[in-house]
Image (spheres, helix red, strand yellow):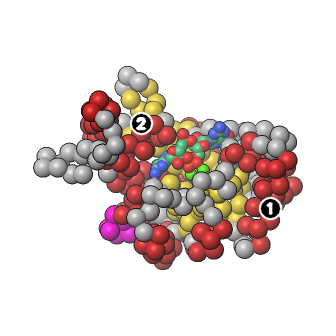
Amino acid sequence: KLNGKNRYTVYSEELDGDQAKQSEEMVRNLQAAIELDQIEVYYQPKINASTEDIMGFEALVRWEHPELGIISPGLFIPLAEQSELIFPIGLLVIEKACRALKQWQEQFKLPLTMSVNLSPIQLNDKDLIKKINRIIEETAVYPKHLDFEITESEKFKSVKDALLMFKKIVNLGCTLSIDDFGTGHSTLDYLRKIPAKTLKIDQVFVKNIGLSPDDEAILDATIDMAKRVGHFIVAEGVETEEQRQYLTSKGCDYFQGYLFSRPVPASEIDRILTDREKI
Ligand code: C2E
Ligand code: CA
Ligand code: CA
């Protein structure tokens, strides 16, 4: 919670003394990182399965620590969510991603899209819609090119309020993608209720192509179902040619994965798009 000096602290009561102190120190470091502009956004291309061209990007946050190097979001997003630092970090990612998108669209004359991950905690911000709208106006991106990746989560304060927020995002003109489908808390009921255009198949299922007949069956059924209800399908974590071929044969629309590109800094995307122009 915010205390008097505009500092954030962790409010988990389950932590013992030492752990709590450690977390508080990390939260202070993370807050300093925001102020020192050490929070950066990397971008991973999304590839159109039939044309093999880049259709857009997913923005993935990184903490560029001067001593520890690049810290992955898996390590600091949970802490940010507990300490409310997710609010400034979340907005910072949307803003940087929109600026980068606009620049690439204008420079390369391509109809690219940008997907940003939205934490369930961010939905508790009553002004979220206003803030997203302000960023859209300031960066002049078309809302239809801005996509938010959402997960179903036990972290929703209220599912009803979350659904309302999703509707408001769609009313802004933005699109929604359901992330990590097939794992955790994503359910068929969720798929029915969320006004999402796209479903992202979790990496676990892609990883098990050719290895687990059960997971292949789930994958096939998921793709079939998603297509029937009119969703686009993005397969995540595509690493091998075999996976790509399998997913293409099943009708996946878009790919994301190391086979095409890792998440890279904006400067690297500049280079990729420039090289693409030369072909
Ligand atoms: P996610 O949204 O499921 O993102 C996909 C993760 O898979 C990314 O990890 C990406 O680097 C990784 N990945 C992509 N292609 C491959 C592949 O071919 N093989 C393998 N093994 N991995 C691949 P990353 O960047 O470490 O992000 C981890 C998670 O952190 C994300 O999972 C997302 O839940 C969260 N995250 C990242 N950026 C943000 C953000 O800006 N805001 C929020 N709220 N969460 C974020
Ligand atoms: Ca995602
Ligand atoms: Ca995912």
In the image: residue 273, left or right of residue 228: left
Q: Which residue is mark 1?
A: 221
Looking at the image, is mark 1 or mark 2 earlier in the sequence?
2
Residue 279 can be seen in this image: no
Residue 272: image x %, image y %?
63, 41
Residue 64: image x %, image y %?
41, 32
Residue 102: image x %, image y %?
49, 57
Alpha carbon separation for disc pair 1 and 2: 37 Å
The boundaries of the magenta stretch are: 125-131
In the image: residue 91, left or right of residue 207: left
Residue drawn at 30 percent across, 45 percent down? 13
The magenta stretch spans residue 128: yes
Q: Secondary structure at mark 2?
A: strand
Residue density around tag 2, few if under 14, some if 14–19, many if 20 or more, within 10 Å: many
Above or below: residue 253 compared with residue 189: above
Q: In the image, what residue type sits under mark 1?
A: Ala
Q: Secondary structure at mark 1?
A: helix
Residue drawn at 45 percent across, 32 percent down? 71
Residue density around tag 1, few if under 14, some if 14–19, many if 20 or more, within 10 Å: few
Residue drawn at 43 percent across, 44 percent down? 77
